[in-house]
Structure formats: C-alpha cells, structure tokens
Amino acid sequence: MKTYAIAAIPGDGIGQEVVPAGERVLQALAATEGGFAFDFEHFGWGGDWYRQHGVMMPADGLEALRGKDAILFGSAGDPKIPDHITLWGLRLKICQGFDQYANVRPTRILPGIDSPLKRCKPEDLNWVIVRENSEGEYAGVGGRAHQGHPIEVATDVSIMTRTGVERIIRYAFKLAQSRPRKQLSVVTKSNAQRHAMVMWDEIAAEVARDFPDVHWDKELVDAMTARMVNKPATLDTIVATNLHADILSDLAAALAGSLGIAPTGNIDPERRYPSMFEPIHGSAFDIMGQGLANPIGTFWSCVMLLEHLGELAAAARLMHAIEAVTAQPALHTRDLGGQATTADVTQAVCHALKASQD
Ligand code: IPM
Ligand code: MG
C-alpha cells in the first residue's frame, strides 16, 4: 500500500481549525478507500513561532518539507505582526522557494450555495483561475530611501520574465485544453502597462499557436471584473498575473457564494518540489477558536491535493461528499448564513464518505 507523506502547516487563526479538519477528512477517505494511506507531519510555524523565535519558520524549514508528497496549509496572518512579515516569512517563502509557479483557483457554485448573482444558474459559473505565482507584482523587488524625510521614496517593481510568463500561459492553455469547453481568457492591462503587459500579450499569442484546439480571447483586467459579473457563462479558464489574479479570484469566490468555500493549489508542475494546497480565505482572527470556520475551502483543497497525487477516483469521491454536505442548509456555517460548526461539517463529510464506500 502506498503511503503519502503530507506536511500539515496550520499557520495562524482559523488555519489551526480547518487544517486538522482537513486531515480528519483525508484520513477518513484513506480508511474507506483502501489503496493508500497518509502519514502527516505537523509544523507549528506562523505567528506564535515568530513570537518565540523571531522568524515565521526555521531557516532550514524548506529542507524539512522537500521530501514530502504534498503540503496542506491553513493561513498566515496575525493582527499583532505586520502582514508583509507573516506573508513573506512563511507562505511566500514556500511558494517561491519551491517555485510553485502555478496557483490554480477553481470556482463553482456548489449545490445548496446561493450566489449573489441572481440571474446566474450554477452551471453558468464554472471557472478555473490560473494565477502566476512566482514573480510579477509579488517579485519583492523594490526599496525605500530617504525614510522619514519629505523626499522619501518607495518602489515595488513588477518583474516579468519571458520564461515566467511563457510557462504560466502554457500551463493555462494545457489546463484549458483538458476541460470540456477548451476555452481560455488571457487577462491583461497592456493599454496602460505598455512594457511587461505588452510582452505578456505577445507571449500569449505565441503559445496559442501550439494549442489550435483551444479558443482564446484577451480581456483587460478592469473589463474582466464586469464580465465576471454580467456574463459569467462566457468564461471557463482564465490566466492572469499574480496581482490581477489575486483580485479576480476574491471576486470569483464571492460570486460563487463565499470565500470560505474556495480552494487553491500552489503547484510546481514539473514536480521538482512538493506542491501546497490551502483554502483561499485568511486567518480570520475575529472568529478563531469558536468552531465557526467553514472547513469546505480546506476540503476542496484536499480534493486538489488528491488530484495532484494522481488519486483521481478518491478525489472525485471526496468532491461528491463535499457537495452532498453543502446541499444541506442545516450543514452551512455562519459565512453561508447557517449555524453549523466546523466539527458538524467535518463529521458530515466523514459520514458521507463512509456512506459512499463500495
Ligand atoms: C491570496 C491572499 C494572499 C495574496 C494574501 C494573504 C497576501 O490574498 O492567497 O490570495 O495576496 O497572495
Ligand atoms: Mg487574495
């Protein structure tokens, strides 16, 4: 029997509630599936680690993760520590250290979930946003000078490399090609950003030649926000820069009913390093420790983790169990207008898995 080595990094806030829930569900799945097992190792990195050690994770932390088959991550963020420290010290350190350059964000309206789009049928909104995850606006290049003086200056330079742009656009075309509609929208802002985004457009047109069966179009990022709201059915796979996709994916998650549901995978498509799966939501300190967190975003991230491991049948079974649970309003957490707890939803998904056992 195959045993997958998984690193669990709950991080901060409700990450410490949803990651254990995800682990329970994965273990319940393995117990009912039979062909594989999970060996979890837990890493207590994040805000509390920072208070004790002055860093979000140990200097050799990446080495401890390197041999794992996948990473299940919660969230990083602490009201008492500046956001750029928590982000750069943990999540980005792993994403960039392991060159997880494809951030994949599927969005659908799950059964039983209400979309704020009143005229949108659930089948009209079935998107995957592919976010460039290694450079662009998050390259970390820039600096400050003359600090505290009237002439103070600060820069954040967005870096786009031909290699970086080509590999993410190629990944998106491949993903679009694997989906039934074979359709890709390339998000740009080449009207205003006349250097890097013009190169982005040129590379998209070049890569497109290798995918003659994929229909593709180009959309300015501002126009894309309106298209997502007004014509959701015209979209399928979407590729965008790090920051553009960051913003569009929050909009997508909200249009699909709740940020608490949305999953993401930080993927190294070349499999040189482990990939990392996490709910899209943050640490939500306002509700932490109360059992109110919606674990569905983590469970759906576990589906992506299973797909990445090649356990496609198990992934599909977990997705069905999730959908059977979201279909019942009595099992909705507070973010969905319900009263169910994290534990209620976790138990229900575990039961649904047992019920679907062959
Ligand atoms: C996300 C988040 C992060 C990001 C935050 C926590 C910095 O919003 O994963 O989308 O902007 O990358
Ligand atoms: Mg975001």
Image: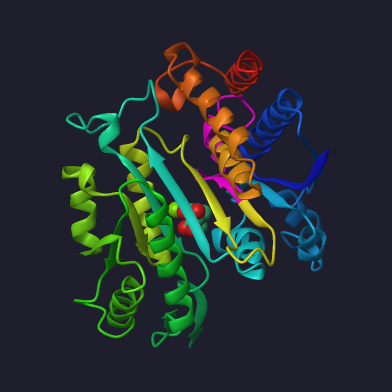
Residue name at image x 37 percent, y 55 percent: 176
Instruction: Identify the residue at the far front of this view.
Output: 213
Which segment did they paint magenta? Answer: 277-297
The quarter of the picture where the C terminus appears is top right
Residue 318, by quadrant, is: top right
The quarter of the picture where the N terminus appears is top right
Secondary structure mostly seen in the magenta stretch = loop
Horizontal and vertical percent position of residue 206: 32, 79
Answer above or below: position of 180 versus 221: above
Residue name at image x 43 percent, y 65 percent: 242
Horizontal and vertical percent position of residue 216: 26, 62
Q: Is residue 47 visible?
A: yes
Answer above or below: position of 343 versus 177: above
Horizontal and vertical percent position of residue 77: 59, 51
Of residues 173 and 344, the one nearer the viewer is 173
Of residues 88 and 146, the one nearer the viewer is 88
Residue 338, by quadrant, is: top left
Answer above or below: position of 20 versus 233: above
Horizontal and vertical percent position of residue 52: 80, 55
Q: Is residue 212 magenta?
A: no
Q: Is residue 80 visible?
A: no
Tag count in the figure? 0
State the scheme by which the image is colored. rainbow
Residue name at image x 39 percent, y 88 percent: 151
Residue name at image x 69 percent, y 64 percent: 273
